[in-house]
Every structure is written in structure tokens, then in C-alpha cells.
Image: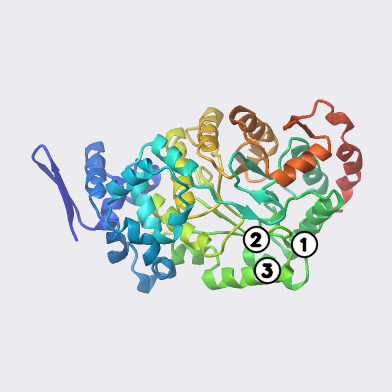
């Protein structure tokens, strides 16, 4: 089906819905690299105007990627709830935007009636403030050993990465993060070496820390899912199962996974029964551009493919999902403006689809961005009700070689916006003397954790 519009006598035609979506996307280098982007701002504006008139139902009738060639497309169509969609079925993309901005209720009930392509489409015709306003009304609460996503709360992933997985370096970073109130979402390590022995050692260490100090949080070593599955078979204490995911079957295959593997991993983790408050136990990371980098995007724009990854995540009721928004580099998101826009889009789309969205507010050193840009995105996401952010020593990940957010950045956001950690973790911080009246204690030198933690420096050796 051809979609068309005109402006001052000039006709614009878009050969199909996939092309229209790509041309309507706000400018980003990934789409330019793929040859999908609008050729001018006028063409982009016209594509957005034409897209606004497209009925939401068209995304069911005209899949961007045919389901017979892609299991993610099949998942999207099979899981679409017609009854949940019924109140919106008569709306266009523009009408849906107006409805979202006028409605004042919690929007979590919409998730089963929406497809990723619908939410990606509406995001393309929204301003940043629209994305923030709607996202804030989508509260997605998950539980494992503490409760994440409640109103007025902001959680953090304590990320103690080390370039050689050095025990003392990891232990120091864990202690540093805990002393600044970080770690309620997860204490999660990206291993420098993804082999069974190394990952097993890290998991035992994190488990011992959490058990010894009775910390109401969960651990994760962000190894490949098949590595984690092999360790679960050996009885290793695994809290969360991690995997990077994408929005097409081919892109996921490039990661060495498919839906069947993820289902098997989830079933294995559920059998361990390690959650105390709930059984949300999957952790997924995503990011715009991953499908393009694998040449597996099927001509779909980067932001829409990213939204399709959220359909994969939604299938597994995860505890945590976050977009690693600026990690791939300027070839995909060129500068601070593009990174900020992408972060707000990803958070908005994930929340509308019912996901507990966080964001790794980050950039690489060769991008046209700096820490001030990240401060802006961090603050905007805090206003938008983002579930969690990263906590990294000095905001500089020395293992993955990129810039993110620090323990201090989380404190800034909590104090500025009146946000608090997860309630169970907050109570632990108070009991340990790390926090006092929801602020860092002035007497942290006397905190028992400091005295008790010193023996952990060699615990992995």
C-alpha cells in the first residue's frame, strides 16, 4: 500500500508502511547509515503528518517484517490481545497520541493490546515532553528480593566491572556502591571473561556478599544465557538470568539465542526458587542499532526494531530491562541530541508495552556527546519515572570502555526529584547506618559494613 501526502503542490509518496515509519523517524545516524532516513526535514515532517493519519489497526494488517520469516513478528501477532485493543481500534496514530496526552489514568492496562510498531509509530510524532508525560503514568512494578518500580522510587544497578575480573577491584567497587546507596535493582557484573569457572566464581562471591550482609537485592553476572544455563545445571546460585536481545529473529540469532532458548533458561531459573518476594528473574539489555550492526534489520528503522525487542522481553516477565542507549557509538546515535531523544523513546515504548524500563545513560568517547548531555538525559528520565539507572565508579566503566552514570549521579537525581530507593533496600540502608532520613549519613565512617567488608578483598582468590 502506498502512503502519500502533499505540501504546497509537492507530492510525497511512501511505498509501504515500513518506508513511511523510517522516513518519519527523528534524525539519527543509524537510519542514515542504512539508507532509510528522510532525505530532508520537509520529507520527515510530511512522513510524520501522513503517519498520523494511519489507523492503528493497519499495523496488524501490514506487518513490517512478514511473520513467515521472523519469529518475533509471529510472537507479536500471536500475543496481540484483541479485547484489550478494542477501545483503541478506531484510532489513528495521531488520534492515539491525543488520547494518551488527554488520559490521566495509569496506562499499564494497555500493554496487551498494543504492538511494538504501534508504540514506535506514536512516539515518532511526539515531542520529548510528550514522551516524558506519558511515560510517567506507566508504573511497572516487579519483585524478586525487593520491590522495584513503585511511584517515587528510583533504583540503581551497581556495576562493579573490572578489566581483569580482579577480586579486590570488584570487592572495592561493590563496597563503594553500597556505601552510596546503590544496588537495589541488582549488583550486576559484566565479566571480562565469559567462561564457566570465572562466571561461577563471580556468582559465588556476589551470593556470599548478599547472604552475609542480608542485602535485599539480587545478583547477576551478565554472561551469555547458555553459560548461565550450564551453571544452573551444576547447581550454582543464579538469581537473575541475563541476555542481550534484539527485535528480529536474525538479530537474536547473531547473539546466539532464540525464543526457545530463553524459555528454557527461564524455566530452569524458576526451578531454583531463589526469589523471596516475587519470581521476576530475567534481565534483558537492548539498544538501538544492534539489528543494523548484524545486518538483520530487514529495512526497518532502528527505533522501530528496538521497540520490537520489547515484545521479546515482555514474553518473559522480566525483573529488569534497560536500553544501553549510547553504547554502540556515533555510527548509530551521532551526538548528545540523538542519544537523548533515543533514550526517551526507548523508555516510553518499553513502558507502554508493560516493561520495567531502565536506562544505561551512556556514550562512547568518540561520540559527539559529553557528561552534560548525560546529565540532561538522566534528569529527563528521572522526571519520566524511569525504573532504574546504572551506578558505576566515577561513571567510567574501565572494562567496557564507555561513559555512564555514577553513584553520585543517582544521589543527585534522588535528592533533586525527591526519589528514594526500593523500600526494602532503603530500610537496609537505614539499618546499616548508610542512610539517615533518606540521605547519606554523615557518620558513615562508623558503618559496620566498612569494618566487616575488608576480608572480602581476597574472597575470589
Q: Which residue is pictured at 67% across the width and 66% down the height?
A: 227
Q: Which of the two discs, 2 and 1, sits closer to the camera?
A: 2
Q: Which residue is pictured at 81% across the width and 25% down the height?
A: 442
Mark sitting on residue 270: 3
Q: Is residue 173 visible?
A: no
**Along the horizontal axis of the image, is 264 left or right of 214?**
left
Residue 191 lies, in percent from the top left, at 70, 54
The residue beneath circle 1 is 200
Q: Is residue 317 above or below residue 435?
A: below
Q: Is residue 281 visible?
A: yes
Find numbered disc 2 in the image and state the secondary structure of the residue it sits on.
Answer: loop
Q: Which of the two discs, 3 and 1, sits closer to the camera?
A: 3
In whole angstroms, how far apart are the C-alphas of marks 3 and 2?
8 Å
In whole angstroms, how far apart are the C-alphas of marks 2 and 1?
18 Å
Quadrant housing residue 7: top left
The residue beneath circle 2 is 281
Find numbered disc 1 in the image and state the secondary structure of the residue it sits on.
Answer: helix
The residue nearer to you, when weighing 244 against 315, is 315
Q: Is residue 201 above or below residue 433?
A: below
For the residues bearing labels 3 and 2, Cβ distance under 8 angstroms:
yes
Quadrant housing residue 38: top left
Q: Which residue is pictured at 51% across the width and 44% down the height?
A: 325
Residue 236 lies, in percent from the top left, at 78, 66
Circle count:
3
Find numbered disc 3 in the image and state the secondary structure of the residue it sits on.
Answer: helix
For the residues bearing labels 3 and 1, Cβ distance under 8 angstroms:
no
**Along the horizontal axis of the image, is 385 left or right of 295?**
right
- Mark 2 neighbour class, 10 Å CA radius: few under 14, some 14 to 19, many 20 or more: many
Q: Which residue is pictured at 39% across the width and 38% down the height?
A: 130
The residue nearer to you, when weighing 244 against 309, is 309
Mark sitting on residue 167: none
Amino acid at each position: 500500500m502506498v502512503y502519500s501526502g502533499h505540501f504546497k503542490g509537492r507530492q510525497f509518496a511512501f511505498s509501504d508502511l515500513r518506508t513511511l515509519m523510517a522516513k518519519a523517524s527523528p534524525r539519527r545516524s543509524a537510519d542514515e547509515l542504512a539508507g532509510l532516513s528522510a532525505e530532508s526535514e520537509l520529507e520527515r515532517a510530511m512522513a510524520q503528518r501522513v503517519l498520523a493519519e494511519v489507523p492503528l489497526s493497519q499495523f496488524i494488517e501490514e506487518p513490517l517484517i512478514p511473520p513467515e520469516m521472523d519469529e518475533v513478528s509471529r510472537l507479536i501477532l500471536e500475543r496481540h490481545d484483541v479485547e484489550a485493543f478494542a477501545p483503541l481500534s478506531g484510532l489513528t496514530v495521531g488520534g492515539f497520541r491525543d488520547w494518551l496526552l488527554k488520559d490521566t489514568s495509569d496506562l499499564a492496562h494497555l500493554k496487551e493490546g498494543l504492538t511494538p510498531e504501534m508504540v514506535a509509530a506514536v512516539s515518532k510524532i511526539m515531542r520529548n515532553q510528550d514522551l516524558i508525560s506519558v511515560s510517567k503514568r506507566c508504573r511497572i512494578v516487579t519483585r524478586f528480593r525487593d520491590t522495584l518500580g513503585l511511584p517515587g522510587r528510583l533504583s540503581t544497578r551497581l556495576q562493579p566491572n573490572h578489566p581483569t575480573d580482579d577480586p579486590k577491584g570488584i570487592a572495592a567497587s561493590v563496597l563503594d556502591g553500597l556505601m552510596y546507596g546503590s544496588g537495589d535493582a541488582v549488583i550486576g557484573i559484566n565479566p571480562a571473561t565469559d567462561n564457566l569457572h570465572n562466571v561461577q566464581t563471580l556468582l559465588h562471591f556476589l551470593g556470599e556478599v548478599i547472604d552475609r550482609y542480608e542485602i535485599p537485592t539480587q545478583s547477576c553476572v551478565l554472561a551469555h544465557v547458555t553459560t548461565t544455563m550450564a551453571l544452573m545445571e551444576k547447581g550454582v546460585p543464579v538469581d537473575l538470568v541475563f541476555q542481550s536481545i534484539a527485535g528480529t529473529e536474525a538479530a537474536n540469532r547473531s547473539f546466539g539465542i532464540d525464543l526457545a532458548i530463553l524459555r528454557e533458561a527461564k524455566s530452569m531459573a524458576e526451578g531454583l526458587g531463589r526469589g523471596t518476594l516475587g519470581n521476576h528473574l530475567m534481565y534483558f539489555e537492548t539498544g538501538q542499532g544492534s539489528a543494523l550492526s548484524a545486518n538483520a534489520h530487514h529495512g526497518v528503522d532502528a527505533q522501530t526494531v528496538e521497540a520490537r525487542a520489547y515484545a521479546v522481553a515482555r514474553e518473559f516477565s522480566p525483573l529488569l530491562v534497560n536500553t544501553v542507549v549510547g553504547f554502540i557509538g556515533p555510527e548509530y546515535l551521532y551526538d548528545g541530541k540523538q542519544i537523548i531523544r533515543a533514550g526517551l523513546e526507548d523508555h516510553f515504548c518499553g513502558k507502554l508495552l508493560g516493561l520495567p524500563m531502565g536506562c544505561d545513560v551512556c556514550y562512547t568517547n568518540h561520540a559527539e556527546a559529553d557528561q552534560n548531555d548525560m546529565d540532561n538525559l538522566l534528569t529527563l528520565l528521572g522526571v519520566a519515572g524511569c525504573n532504574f539507572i546504572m551506578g558505576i565508579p566515577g561513571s567510567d566503566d574501565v572494562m567496557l570502555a564507555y561513559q555512564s552514570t555514577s553513584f553520585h549521579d543517582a544521589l543527585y537525581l534522588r535528592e533533586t526529584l525527591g526519589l528514594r530507593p526500593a523500600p526494602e533496600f532503603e530500610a537496609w540502608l537505614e539499618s546499616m547506618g548508610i542512610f539517615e532520613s533518606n540521605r547519606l549519613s554523615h557518620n558513615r565512617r562508623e558503618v559496620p559494613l566498612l569494618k566487616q567488608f575488608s576480608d572480602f578483598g581476597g574472597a575470589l582468590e
